[in-house]
Amino acid sequence: MKVLRLMSHEEFEVEGELSVGDVIKAGEAFAIVLTHYHEESEFIRYAGQIEREKVEKFMPDLISGRRVARCMILRSDTAPRPGDEVRHVDDETLKKMHYMDGEFSMPYLIPLMKKCKDNLWVLRDYIKRLMEIVPEERDVLEIILAEIEYGMLRGVEI
Amino acid sequence: MDLSEFSLGRILDSDIISTSKLFKEYIKRNEFRVETISFEKFRIDGEGANWFFDVLEGERVVGVDGSQLRPLKEFGLPFGAVQAAKIAVVHGMKKFNVSYRTKWLDSNINLDVERFELEIGALLEEMDSTSHLFVDGSLILSFVSQFNTSLQRKFIALIDKFLEKSEETATPVFGFIERSYAKDMVGDESFVYDSLALGDHLEPMEYTEPLRCERKITEKYSNDVYFCYLKLNPFFPVRVEFPEWMKKDHRKYLTFIAAECAIGSTKSYPYILERAHRYATISENERKMLASILGIGTSFKWMSKRV
């Protein structure tokens, strides 16, 4: 999996099989997958001239019609760049990412809540994961989770 | 204003667009073509509608293109960057790979030579006797005369190494020039350049015999680069350059180039270079992003040009 393009200082896109909510590392940046979509292949430029099967065999980079995941940077000193390798972040690394000078911190929380306002379940599942891997911060994470779940209920018309 | 009032070098009291029709008329009347130009020509005979797939089947092709970021100075940062994108495709096998190289530099360093070094370096890695390597541009570095001696040496050392290794490893390399302004056939005194002069002398799928470039550019390879003009469409021919060792098999190689062009989106430019360019390009969006990532100051001139 590789970084495809940067969308802004806080978002980038990755080509590859990722799921919404996955936490990844691209270059030096930690990020969470917010959404994904299927990008139209560039085959369209050749359509009508050469049959699809031939394009697939002879111009394979055109045909793939990539699956693209849009990610939000959680923490980074340097932004990723197109072509950077992307890998999943394990629990231990994710836990470490949240400690600066021994203090637990989530500086990305407010921007992430704003990004996820239409699909708060992504954030809810992420916080639940954090509760499992950082049990010592469970109290504060429970407060955040309650707020998120309240936000989800608020969005439902009864 | 009529045509009698038009001549090259004369100041006209109007804008360029308004006077362009007159200029077109002027070109038409003066017929900047060369009547006599002698050379042997060859024809690429592709059999069947999909002849190019037969030519390319199983062949590995590599293309490289570069890009650079110059405007950082405009944002108050004395830095620049060069990037080279390389794509390798094995035709007919569904295999491809895209890779990048980047270098950040201080603004005193010449970006052109650094970019060239990245591109050539990326191609040197592919000299395996089976791949076909495409360079977007000339193998005859006439443009180096504009640089100082030290830069000239660097450019020349790189191209020498490139051509030398091509011969050593028997890896075919092609310099592809879509719009050439060379005057190797018509002579320096000529007003028009080779490709314009040859427009009427070649039919589509015909090419000129390989001719040695007599321009003395490098010490070691001054006479070792050959060129052909290949016509791929009803308009102007493209120029293709290659080292001397490939000359004897020019039919095979020119057919290969024509096939590579035939699968490009325009059918007149090699697919592999088209894709390398696509990967190498730093889009306007990416540039904006970079400005945002680096947190650099605003250049109002830069912004105004993009409104």
Image (tube, rainbow, N blue to C red):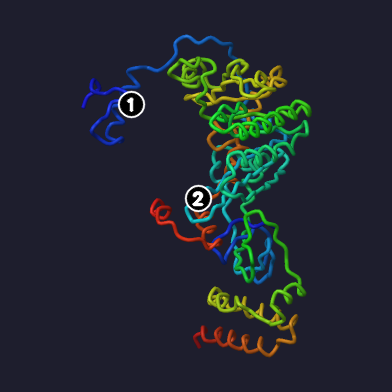
Please give the name of the residue rendered at 63% of the width and 60% of the height, measured from the top-left corner.
Answer: A80
> Please, which residue is most extreme toward the front here?
B149
Question: Rounded to the nearest whole Å, what is the CA distance between mark 2 and mark 1?
Answer: 35 Å
B158 w.r.t. B80: above or below: above
Nearer the viewer's eye, disc 2 or disc 1? 2
Disc 2 element: helix
- Chain letter behind tag 1: B
Quadrant for residue B35, please give it.
Answer: top left
Q: Position of residue B49 (x, y in %)?
A: 60, 28
Q: Where is residue B12 in the image (x, y as percent from the top left)?
A: 25, 30
Which residue in the structure is indicated by mark 1? B24
Say whether disc 2 or disc 1 marks the residue closer to the N-terminus. Answer: 1
Mark 2 Cα within 10 Å, few/some/many (few <14, many 20+)? some
Q: Is mark 1 on a helix, strand or loop?
A: helix
The residue sitting at 58% across, 87% down in the picture is A147
Looking at the rendered structure, the kind of residue marked 2 is Pro
Same chain for the residues under marks 2 and 1 in the image: yes
Looking at the image, residue B152 sits to the left or right of residue B190; the answer is right
